[in-house]
Amino acid sequence: MPTLRQLIRQQRGADTLDLVADVLVIGGGPAACWAAIAATEAGARVVVVDKGYLGTSGATAPSNTGTWFVAPGAGREAAIERRQQLNGGLAVPRWVDRTLDMAWRRLHTLAEWGYKFPNDDSGKPYLTNLRGPDYMAFMRRRLSRAGIAILDHHPALELLRESGVIAGAAGIDRQRNRPWRVRAGAVVLATGGCAFGERMLGATGLTGDGYLMAAEAGATMSGMEFSAQYACAPKQTSLNKGVPFVWASYYREDGTRLDTVNKERYVVVARALLEGPVWAQFDRGIPELTPWLRQGQPNCFLPHDRAGVDPFTQRFPVVLRCEGTVRGVGGIKLMADDCSTGIPGLYAAGDAASRERLTGAITGGGGPNSSWAIASGNWAGLAAAQFAAREVGAIGDRKVTAIGGAGLRPAVAARQDANAADVLQTVRDEFLPLERNFFRREATLRQSLERLDRTWCEVRDHLPGEGIDAVKSREAASLTATSRWAYASALARAESRGMQRRLDLPAADPAFMCRFETSGLDHIQVTRSDVMDTAVA
Amino acid sequence: MIEIVSNDRCIACDICVRVCPANVFDPVRKKPPRIARQTDCQTCFLCEIYCPTDALYVAPCAEGPTGITEAQVEAAGFFGSYSRALGWQRGKPDGSDKDPTYNIRTAPR
């Protein structure tokens, strides 16, 4: 039997690419890579399709990320307990423990495979950090060596279904303008979070595509109100990297320093930004820190070096960039330990999945999300391979139906004045501003939702999605759907908790020690569920 | 955003066409690639480090082109500066074992 890679070569000149695999992984970040590896280890033939390039796609590749790396034992219990004090009570210790467990094991695997970790001062490999470009380039080589077929620049546009079971996906090769279809025994969505059109590192592909595809199949989102994570960046830049800002002081235009002592510093910065420009300077660290930061986080200094500013001795203007559900929490609700979504044949991993059980109401940015990508990728990949192996009959004989709607197949009639760029701008206008999303109020949430609902109807009824243009149209549809789920659940959570900051309801309310699940496309339903849910293996 | 593909440095290998996650480049036969979709650039600087000849320059402004020229970038020594800081060699990963970030994570706050 020819390998998948041989089949891809054979079809090079064909009008469409048509493949059959056991498992299809959609995405190109760490969760996608780990899912592909785990599925392959379980004996599956795996295809990975990515919108961009597996190695540079996603939020990890351009970053230098910590991992949440804690040895088993009493120390781990204490670490879980410490975070439980911060996360608004919405995490589930058993899930935190199993995430840490899988990350612990797989980071050791990464060292065994030869990823070049640095040694710490005691000469031991330091596994608590992964340098994004190197990590993702390394993972790509591992996938290639394992015989996994990687299709870059092959955005998935919609899922395929047969008799209620997800049976693959279809999309377009955006560099050759050629449709592709992969029929598969199971699909893993590892498409990342949603950055709502923000201009920042890694966000270009993070438009919520996986959420929309899952919702069209009938899946539910959870924790979407926790989508108001923001990070500091030098003004006009893409560098939403928080590490150097740990040692920053912040100043108003008149030079007075913002008081951030014992306060959530980004809340202080956000309030000041609503009144006028804010400047920062990395002036609070010990002298040794300067070379460590420069060598360890070099991309953070590109804007300063290229502008001729020394950020350790000179002030520079800053903004807050919206990190949506990337460093936020919400995503596809997982129904069980195996990352299943409740839709047969469909699994979710990484930021495409809700991380509430791991991080509760606060950000998992950095270490927790990085360990989650490893853990959930491994669970989802294994489960997808096992599901595919249980399927009866040849996958290639299936009569599949494509189930994509908005942005692909206008419900009424394509209208040329409906365009994806306008939709993107609407989502940016409603979701990025501090006064709408960082600080929320019932009145502004309702106002934004009304506009986004109208936009959704336009997209669904009239936005054309032909050929290459379908990529941007589907992104527009995904962004619109995701912003509506986020604001609908933000309204339902009539309190402040973690990153949900309601100016009209500033306190946490014990009555809201619960989750909010959102589902539906035209009519969004928000329902409550228990924190200690019954997700079982 | 991506602003410069240096004609002098580029060897037309088209690696940047493959690796750009935002698909901003179009290949041109036997010539340097064209920046075809500049505003799609997410200013991640990764094309710079994958370029084997340090022929690309991404200006840190993510919101629009700045108009910087190749001569200015050359004079300032900015070509390949991110690669050198990481320790990447001719477009290939290297240097992650010398990352001092572990010191940062334990530094006094």
Image: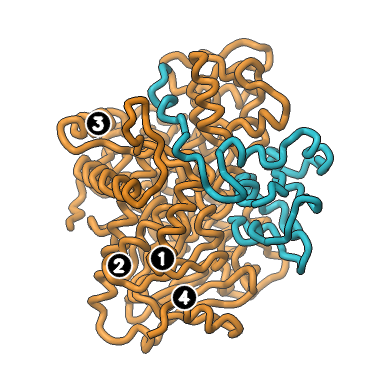
Q: CA distance from mark 3 to mark 1?
A: 32 Å
* Label drawn at residue A384: 2
Residue most extreme to the left: A74
Helix, strand or loop for disc 4: helix
Sequence-earlier tag: 2 or 1: 1
Say if mark 3 contacts mark 2, CB within 8 Å: no
Say if mark 2 contacts mark 1, CB within 8 Å: yes
Task: From the image, tell me which residue sits under label 1.
Answer: A25
Q: Residue at x 43, y 77 (%)?
A: A4
Q: Amino acid at mark 1?
A: Val
B34 and B22: which one is in front? B34
B88 and A70: which one is in front? B88
Q: Colour of chain A?
A: orange
Helix, strand or loop for disc 1: strand
Q: Determine if marks 2 and 4 fall on one subunit.
A: yes
Q: Amino acid at mark 4?
A: Arg
Pinpoint residue A153: horizontal percent, then vertical percent: 57, 65
Sequence-earlier tag: 4 or 3: 4
* Label drawn at residue A5: 4
Q: Determine if marks 3 and 2 fall on one subunit.
A: yes
Say if mark 3 contacts mark 1, CB within 8 Å: no
Q: Residue at x 66, y 23 (%)?
A: A316
The chain coloured cyan is B
Which chain is home to disc 2? Answer: A
Sequence-earlier tag: 4 or 1: 4
Q: CA distance from mark 4 to mark 1?
A: 15 Å
Sequence-earlier tag: 3 or 1: 1
In the depicted structure, whether residue A168 falls above or below residue A295: below
Q: CA distance from mark 2 to mark 1?
A: 9 Å
Sequence-earlier tag: 3 or 2: 3
Helix, strand or loop for disc 2: helix
